[in-house]
Amino acid sequence: MIIEPRMRGFICTTSHPDGCAQNVKNQIEYVKSKGAIEGAKKVLVIGASTGFGLASRITSAFGSNASTIGVFFEKPPSEGKTASPGWYNSAAFEKEAHEAGLYAKSINGDAFSNEVKKQTLDLIKSDLGQVDLIIYSLASPVRMHPTTGVLHRSVLKPIGGVFTNKTVDFHSGKVSEISIQPCNDEDIENTVAVMGGEDWSMWIEALKADNLLAPGATTVAYSYIGPSLTEAVYRKGTIGRAKDHLEATAFSITDSLADINGKAYVSVNKALVTQASSAIPVIPLYISLLYKIMKEEGIHEGCIEQIQRLYQDRLFSGAEVATDEKGRIRIDDLEMRPDVQEKVAKLWNEAVTENLSEISDLEGYRKDFYNLFGFDVEGIDYKAETDEMVNVSSIV
């Protein structure tokens, strides 16, 4: 079939297998170009099919020659209907990994569930014995609690008052004002239940209980802080409470791993275009301005550049892992440089529909958005027929 992007609001409902595969190949080539990383050799990535999780799996495999198990929840294709992009990403990754002689298997299901946890633990027991790195990179808006059976839904809301600021429709380029009503206590509790650290802790407890963590094992979860421009709706809102919980969980996990000399870290990453961030008011405008500045400064990074640097310069540099005063790895250091933030803040005040194409990198934002779904990728003939029925070869 000929596959074209179909938009529904801030979501693309189709994805292109060839474009997704080329994206994966490009990321692999980048990692290989940066040289070998003396990193972990048996890696579990929870949330392995897109964004930072996919970049982590690629960096582990092609930077450190690691065996990887990826857990994700993606929609397979059916005749005449494309899979979700993470499905095609994972298919491409496994194909490249197997051709390189690397172990790679995947589990497709709800990572919050006890069933998927057990399936993953059984696979580690049978194939790897133990793992020495666990990446936790889930980005789901809902979580069915495995113990209580309660379905929790996260929300993006400010705490304590209405939030009003600029936003942009990145399809049309129209800048407008948006107001978001404040949350209630239940909103906070639900958002923490979905996006906080409880499930991360459950994974590590289950792995440890079955003796599946190698001595000195490391686990890393991903977070975001962002600038003062977005803090009322993000870091000081409901999601911020969840991130606070996630970051506190790193310390409790580290305490629980003391007997194997294990460590848990939260890595604070930079703002990037994701399916989730595209739906968050204010964030697309901020990112389009940020991209403009960081590209001009020559310090722009995408997911793969961020994670490769995290591995090479922080986690596996041979030195003690550098953290901030709250114990977090700050790989958002370039984004949060004072000079960068000052320039973004100035552009923010100037931004209107009429000048946005000149003062921002809205085109770069749009391109990254379409790239998420395998579209607008260089080297792909989108007028040609392609087979939507792509399998992930090693789904257990």
Image: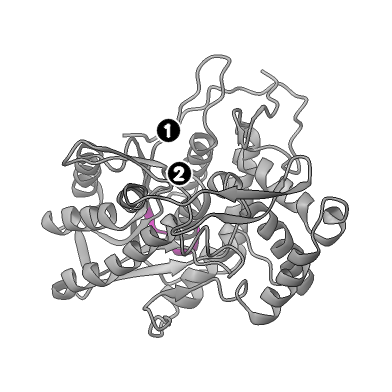
Instruction: Tell me the mark number nearer the camera, choosing from 2 and 1.
Output: 1
Question: Is the residue 261 above or below the residue 173 in the image?
Answer: below
Q: Residue most toward the top?
A: 79
Q: Which residue is mark 2?
A: 98
Q: Which residues are magenta?
A: 62-67
Q: Quadrant of residue 374?
A: top right
The x and y percentages for residue 194 are 34, 48
User: Mark 2 to mark 1: distance in Å?
Assistant: 10 Å
The x and y percentages for residue 241 are 38, 61
Local crowd size for mark 2, using a 10 Å CA cut-off: few (<14), some (14–19), many (≥20):
some
Of 258 and 18, the residue lying toward us: 258
Q: Residue most toward the front?
A: 161
Of 80 and 330, the residue lying toward us: 330
Local crowd size for mark 1, using a 10 Å CA cut-off: few (<14), some (14–19), many (≥20):
some
Residue 64 magenta = yes
The x and y percentages for residue 177 are 69, 50
Q: Residue at x 25, y 55 (%)?
A: 198
Q: How is the image coloured?
A: one colour
Which label is found at residue 213? none
Mark 2 or mark 1: whose residue is earlier in sequence: 2
Amino acid type shown at disc 2: His
Q: Residue at x 68, y 24 (%)?
A: 3
The x and y percentages for residue 346 are 76, 71
Tag 1 secondary structure: loop
Q: Is residue 226 visible?
A: yes
Placement of the C terminus among the 4 image quadrants: top left
Q: Which residue is mark 1?
A: 393
Q: Is residue 63 toward the left or the right of residue 140 in the image?
A: right
Q: Are marks 2 and 1 in contact (CB under 8 Å)?
A: yes
Tag 2 secondary structure: helix
